[in-house]
Amino acid sequence: MFYVLSSTTLKAQTVPSVDEVFQFFNNKNLLITSREGEVLYGTYYFLEIHFCPSGQYGLYGRSVKQTVLGNEQRSNWQEFGNWKIIRQNGLVGIRYISNQGGQSFYPIYRQNNGALSAGEGVSVVNQGSAICN
């Protein structure tokens, strides 16, 4: 789950090249974390994604949500499919096509310091090389 940046934040960022974004994702095992909703009752997402050089990906997801009654709802899932870095509507980002047929596009931005970003509130940590078949 990626978040879209606000228009004020976008002004401080630029669009990277397709090759630059491809090099960032290719053959990487990335841990992507984000939160949806409020701090106390929001849902936290933890996605471990393996971006294989063949263009395939494996996603291992987990979410955690605190309920009003003090319980914790946990969910785990897996998704597999193909990934590709594309230019769409003036933005460069990653397109996922899952084996189940779903398709998503997430833009990637270059921050003022040169680092690539998936958006405000999204943390991306490189965990090494992708584990691919």
Image: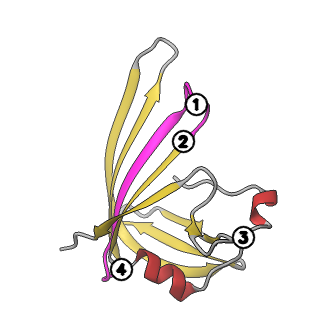
User: CB atoms at circles 2 and 1 under 8 Å apart?
Assistant: yes
Residue wearing tag 1: 39
Nearest the camera: 39 or 84? Answer: 39
Name of the residue lying farthest toward the front: 113
Residue wearing tag 3: 13
Q: Earlier in the sequence, mark 3 or mark 4?
A: 3
Q: Earlier in the sequence, mark 2 or mark 4?
A: 2
Left or right, 7 with reference to 4: right
Q: Secondary structure at mark 2?
A: strand
Name of the residue lying farthest toward the left: 133
Cα separation between marks 3 and 2: 22 Å
Going 36% across and 49% down the picture, which residue do you hit? Answer: 61
Cα separation between marks 3 and 1: 26 Å
Cα separation between marks 3 and 4: 27 Å
User: CB atoms at circles 3 and 4 under 8 Å apart?
Assistant: no
Neighbours of disc 2 within 10 Å: few (<14), some (14-19), many (20+): many
Q: Secondary structure at mark 1?
A: loop
The three-letter amino acid code for the residue at tag 4 is Gly
Q: Secondary structure at mark 3?
A: loop
Cα separation between marks 2 and 4: 27 Å
Q: Work out which quarter of the rendered image holds the C terminus and state it.
A: bottom left
Tell me, yes or no, whether the highlighted magenta stretch contains residue 99. no
User: CB atoms at circles 3 and 2 under 8 Å apart?
Assistant: no
